[in-house]
């Protein structure tokens, strides 16, 4: 009914409109602000940090927050605020590199499984499902020591334990899209397999995948902290949020403040990425897109 | 109180997030009367049903008006009081019986559950459920009570929903397009059943539909709605024969079933009233009979199998074999329109997909313009695909969601390497051809209405200048007025370009007007084939007769109740 009226009032879905919708969502705005603050502080840690993160000042250990040390100092008198800023670098590197690689690997494997021959699909699904069974932490504790602690090991463990989830989702999405009428329509007009996959299916898979990845980032950040806390991750003098937490935990008899200080960035970044991810999902999902 | 109307809706005004959905709607539903609400999509007819049940989405706001049910204003009742009415005094039958039934509980469990208001024992409730199933014509009720919804056919599921709605002997039954998801023969049975049950129980019914043909069969009064407003209301007979409002006149005029003569063009919303009166004069010259036909299908067999890979590896038989098409042979000449009709599941769409080489047949041959299609590699098929285009069932779902209309309509040219100096101009030309404005080129599929998306589908289909167009349910989901426009467009294009058209549909009213030859399909086989005129006038196969009588029966004027007999019962279908 009133087709002309109806279409005339629907604005074109430019990126601008989506952006404005995202910013109008309080959760989206909150997430965006936290995530950008986090990214900026990590990127410019060397400029912002008031102290050298590894400068030891034993005389001034276990100081509570003050004008000089915003988050106090640790058991060696190092400035916790500066260490947190540098720790953000590690967290973001691990999160972005491992989530990005896992999503990319998952995308390729999922597409191959869904589009390739049946036997390949069966083999891939078997492997993915087997790998999904390993809990991240147990896997890390088992495999981590073999390769030695370090940033590379953390990233590798995160990639190996998360890509099967992406692979599974991409495969399912692709299988559903393969039978979608618009794909059949392109196929019936003679489109090549490459055209079908890259122009018609991929754009419809990659959106949900990116949203999923953005919601996975906080999990990876927390896992990195956890692995570093357990000693499988980044090695001590390097300031990682997990290590700050671990050191605070060891000195908990002297002061409980350190544990709190180390927890703040973890809580904030987890909330920020989760809110942003959820707002992104609401904004870009075409079926939810018109809720405003 | 007892002599007043059961439902009195006065001045009801309602909006969804600020967008008006109902404006000053006023009408009554008399006790024991059947009131039809008819309108096209977006007219607010379903909103009205939901408003009476107070089951509106949270964004809905009622800004004015009253809904009096037996003298009480439903809008002022508490949730608790509303709950006491729902299912007991007011019940509801929805369009999609599969989604209306809980998938994980048996029919019996669901049917006893809704009797929770009665203090009877479980056995008594189950007995009543079985009686009710028997009453609505479900065979073997005892056994059916143990079935899950997915184990029943679409018609049976709708019977179960009706049984559940009627079980508590409501005063008002609201039926929202209860037959839209069903085939013509099932539709006729369900309508007859509703009428019988309504007569028996003496309840009032609000019957929401978009199909004018159903009104005389079932309703006493009718309310015609457009854009949330009541355009006209009154006794069915009077509204359909002497409509007062322009809108109702348009609706009546656009119903292809009401155009008595076979015509090539159908009347549309925008007018052109005499177009519908142009009679169809024998086979036209556009059909090139002496040339070799554009499409020749011979002995086509298609089977669907499902076998789990593990069992397959262990050498087990397929768990599941369906022969979708059995030995289909037919041809379509240049310039000719051939329709394949049949119920859902009869194998029509499978034939269309085989012609487009989207489905590998087990046996048989498909020749397109003299080239064999079966068994060709994608590379070899490409030149053939340029000559054939398909319009898929779902107008919006068949358009790639991240493409603009402009790139969608020109994509086939790109695929086939047809030189296009200016892609934008080409898109404009194609859009113009199907009567769409140039500004549509920038839109995305989800911003189109069903009718607009259909036109885009036609433009895309035409862009590689095909010689054969396969249209799968081209009128599905379109309002009557838009349906006429689309079919006229196809007819025009066919005349201009000499296109061969294969239409797959279950809409007999439309087939009668637009196709030259018609093939009737039943359970995978062709049971009858002939010129559309002859087939409609003198059907030979029992199934064809049944199909025609089902749709004619719906279009005939209201008949005396005595005539109705036991039509609501499930009838055995003939063997093909």
Image (cartoon, grey):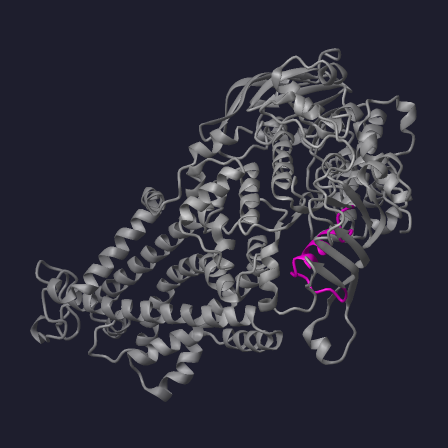
Q: List the single residue furthest toward the bottom.
A: A146
Q: Nearer the viewer, residue B182 or A38?
A: B182
Position of B436 compared to B1: left or right? left
Q: Give the residues in magenta.
A: B342-364
Of B86 and B235, nearer the camera is: B235
Q: Could you tell me which residue is drawn at 68 percent across and 15 percent down?
A: B243
Residue at (33%, 60%) from the top-left corner?
A270
Residue B134 visible somewhere in the drawing: no
Q: Quadrant of residue B125?
A: top right
B356 is within the stretch colored magenta:
yes
Residue drawn 10% across the image and 76% down it? A56
- From the viewer's perspective, is B365 left or right of B131? left
In the rendered image, residue A63, in percent from the top left (x then y), is placed at: 13, 66
Seen in the image, is B84 located left or right of residue A208? right
Residue B175 x, y percent position in the rendering = 71, 31
Q: Position of residue A33 (x, y in %)?
A: 26, 51
The verdict on residue B45 being magenta is: no
For the view shown, which residue lies furthest in the front direction?
B290
- Identified at 62% across, 60% down, the residue is B384
Q: Is residue B231 visible?
A: yes
Q: Quadrant of the N terminus of chain B?
A: top right
Give x and y (percent) for residue A132.
Answer: 50, 73
């Amino acid at each position: 009914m009133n087709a002309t009226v109806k279409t005339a009032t629907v604005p074109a879905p430019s990126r601008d409109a989506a952006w404005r919708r995202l910013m109008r969502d309080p959760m989206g705005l909150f997430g965006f602000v936290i995530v950008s603050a986090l990214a900026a502080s990590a990127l410019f840690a060397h400029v912002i940090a008031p102290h050298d993160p590894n400068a030891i000042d034993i005389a001034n250990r276990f100081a509570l927050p003050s004008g000089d040390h915003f988050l106090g100092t640790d058991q060696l008198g190092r400035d916790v605020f500066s260490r947190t800023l540098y720790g953000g670098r590690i967290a973001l590197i691990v999160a972005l590199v491992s989530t990005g690689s896992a999503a990319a690997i998952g995308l390729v494997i999922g597409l191959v499984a869904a589009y390739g021959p049946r036997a390949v699909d069966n083999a891939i699904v078997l492997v993915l499902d087997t790998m999904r069974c390993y809990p991240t932490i147990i896997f890390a504790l088992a495999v981590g020591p073999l390769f030695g602690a370090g940033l590379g090991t953390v990233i590798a463990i995160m990639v190996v334990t998360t890509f099967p989830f992406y692979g599974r989702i991409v495969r399912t999405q692709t299988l559903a899209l393969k039978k979608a009428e618009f794909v059949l329509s392109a196929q019936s007009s003679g489109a090549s397999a490459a055209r079908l996959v890259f122009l018609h299916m991929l754009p419809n898979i990659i959106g949900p995948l990116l949203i999923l990845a953005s919601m996975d980032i906080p999990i990876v950040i927390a896992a990195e902290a956890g692995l570093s806390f357990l000693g499988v991750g980044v090695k001590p003098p390097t300031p990682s949020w997990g290590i700050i937490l671990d050191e605070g935990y060891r000195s908990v008899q002297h002061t409980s403040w350190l544990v709190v200080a180390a927890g703040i960035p973890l809580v904030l970044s987890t909330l920020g990425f989760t809110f942003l991810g959820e707002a992104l999902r609401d904004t870009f999902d075409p079926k939810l897109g018109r809720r405003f | 109180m007892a002599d007043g109307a059961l439902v009195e809706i006065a001045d009801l005004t309602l909006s969804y997030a600020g967008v008006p959905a109902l404006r000053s709607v006023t009408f009554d539903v008399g006790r024991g009367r059947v009131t039809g609400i008819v309108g096209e999509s977006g007219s607010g007819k379903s909103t009205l049903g939901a408003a009476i049940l107070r089951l509106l989405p949270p964004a809905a706001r009622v800004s004015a008006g009253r809904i009096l049910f037996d003298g009480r204003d439903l809008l002022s009742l508490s949730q608790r009081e509303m709950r006491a009415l729902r299912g007991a005094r007011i019940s509801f039958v929805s369009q999609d019986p599969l989604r209306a039934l809980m998938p994980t509980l048996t029919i019996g469990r669901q049917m006893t559950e809704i009797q929770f208001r009665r203090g009877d024992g479980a056995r008594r409730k189950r007995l009543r459920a079985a009686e009710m199933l028997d009453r609505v014509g479900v065979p073997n009720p005892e056994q059916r009570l143990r079935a899950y919804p997915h184990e029943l056919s679409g018609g049976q599921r709708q019977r179960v929903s009706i049984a559940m709605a009627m079980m508590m002997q409501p005063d008002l039954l609201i039926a929202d397009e209860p037959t839209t998801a069903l085939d013509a023969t099932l539709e006729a049975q369900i309508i007859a059943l509703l009428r019988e049950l309504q007569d028996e129980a003496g309840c009032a019914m609000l019957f929401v539909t978009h199909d004018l043909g159903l009104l005389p069969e079932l309703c006493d009064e009718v309310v015609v709605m457009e854009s949330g407003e009541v355009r006209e209301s009154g006794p069915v007979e009077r509204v359909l024969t002497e409509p007062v409002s322009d809108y109702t006149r348009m609706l009546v005029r656009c119903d292809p079933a009401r155009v008595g003569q076979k015509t090539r063009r159908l009347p549309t919303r925008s007018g052109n009233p005499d177009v519908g009166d142009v009679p169809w004069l024998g086979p036209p010259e556009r059909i090139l009979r002496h040339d070799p036909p554009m499409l020749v299908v011979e002995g086509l067999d298609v089977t669907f199998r499902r076998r789990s890979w593990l069992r397959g590896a262990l050498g087990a038989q397929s768990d599941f074999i369906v022969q979708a098409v059995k030995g289909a042979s037919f041809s379509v000449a240049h310039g000719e329109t051939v329709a394949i009709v049949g119920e859902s599941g009869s194998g029509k769409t499978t034939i269309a997909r085989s012609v487009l080489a989207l489905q590998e047949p087990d046996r048989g041959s498909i020749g397109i313009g003299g080239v064999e299609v079966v068994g060709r590699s994608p590379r070899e098929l490409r030149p053939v695909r340029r000559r054939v285009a398909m319009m898929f069932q779902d107008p919006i779902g068949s358009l790639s969601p991240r493409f603009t209309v402009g790139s969608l309509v020109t994509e086939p040219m790109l695929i086939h390497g047809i030189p296009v100096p200016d892609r934008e101009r080409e898109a404009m030309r194609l859009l113009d051809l199907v009567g769409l404005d140039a500004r549509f080129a920038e839109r995305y599929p989800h911003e189109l209405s069903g009718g607009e998306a259909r036109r885009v589908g036609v433009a895309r289909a035409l862009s590689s200048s095909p010689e054969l167009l396969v249209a799968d349910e081209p009128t599905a989901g379109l309002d009557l007025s838009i349906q006429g426009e689309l079919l006229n467009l196809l007819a025009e294009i066919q005349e201009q370009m000499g296109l061969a058209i294969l239409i797959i549909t279950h809409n007999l009213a439309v087939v009668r007007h637009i196709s030259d030859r018609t093939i009737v399909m039943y359970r995978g086989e062709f049971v009858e084939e002939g010129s559309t005129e002859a087939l409609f006038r003198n059907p030979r196969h029992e199934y064809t007769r049944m199909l025609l009588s089902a749709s004619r029966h719906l279009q005939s004027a209201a008949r005396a109740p005595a005539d109705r007999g036991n039509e609501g019962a499930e009838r055995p279908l003939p063997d093909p």
